[in-house]
Image (spheres, helix red, strand yellow):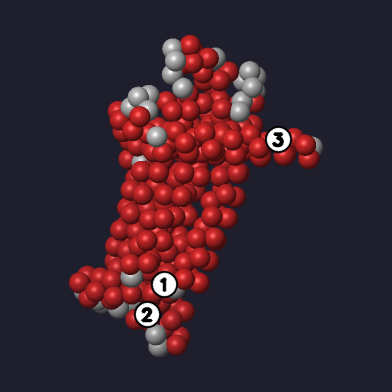
Amino acid sequence: MQYKRKKSLTDFFLFLEEATTELFHIRGNRHVSLMVVISLFLFFGVEALPLIGFIALAIGCLTIMQGYAFLSNFGQGIWVHIILVRVIVGELSGLITALVVIARSGTAISTELGNMVVNREMQLLKSFDIAPMGYLVVSRILGVVISMLVLTLYFNIIAVLGGWLFAQFFNHLSFSAFMNDFFSILTFPHIIMTVLKSIVFGFVIAITASYQGMSVSKASTEVPQRTIKAVVNSIVAVIIVDIIISWLFWIGV
């Protein structure tokens, strides 16, 4: 069992190295199609907007409600904007978006690539001198990373708007005043951290799902097993990366 785990880790890091190399040489990769990346973004990103919007609206309202309920006990209800920045922008927006992307895109990538392996489509691509790593994996990495950036930005916008709307029940504050208070607390490092998390989360999700999908053997029954592994490993990896980036950010600030 220990030998298999070591072999699995070795295979993953070799896969990661190959994918990263292909990604950095994307300009010379004739197999990466812009239309493929756009179509993947439409599925990974655009089609997820309604779900992300609903979750963001709920999170924004709940954050304001709990924030006012707690801070009002100390006469500091006005500082609820700090919670919006620290909790939503800094942490929840990227993490929740990543979980949604894992559930939708991660499973789709792993299942699709796994079925391609079973149906011997990978061998067909190689016979036409098309590298699966560049044609399939790199395009999916780009699609997921771009989707994570757009969806995280969208999450923050909807959450802040939802927070302002719900805040009217506690404190009739104009939108301009609310946003002025919000942006007075929001700093450039917060934006950098959110963008960095989105990029890294997207890369981790895509590379993990692609690896599990392309690790399927010739048995179709292995596809759902690999998909489950892709979801679990992606969630664990995203949480670990989130903790590391947040820790580095806070000790830096």
Whole-percent x, y for residue 104 in the image: 46, 39
At x 34%, y 81%, the residue is 78
Task: Please report the residue visible at 32 percent of the width from the left and 53 percent of the height from the top.
Answer: 154
Q: Identify the amino acid type marked 1.
A: Ile
Badge 3 is on which residue? 7
Q: Residue at x 51, y 26 (%)?
A: 113
Select label 2 or label 3 by which is in front. Answer: 3
Residue 209 in sight from this viewpoint: no
Mark on residue 79? 2
According to the picture, the residue beneath numbered tag 1 turns out to be 83
Q: Secondary structure at mark 1?
A: helix
Q: Position of residue 66 (x, y in %)?
A: 45, 72
Query: Is 172 situated above or below 120?
Result: below
In the displayed structure image, the side of residue 219 where residue 88 appears, left or right = left
Query: How far apart are labels 2 and 1 at the CA level?
Result: 7 Å
Q: Are marks 3 and 1 in contact (CB under 8 Å)?
A: no
Q: Are marks 2 and 1 in contact (CB under 8 Å)?
A: yes
- In the rendered picture of this protein, how many numbered marks are placed on residues? 3
Marks 2 & 3, CB-CB < 8 Å contact: no
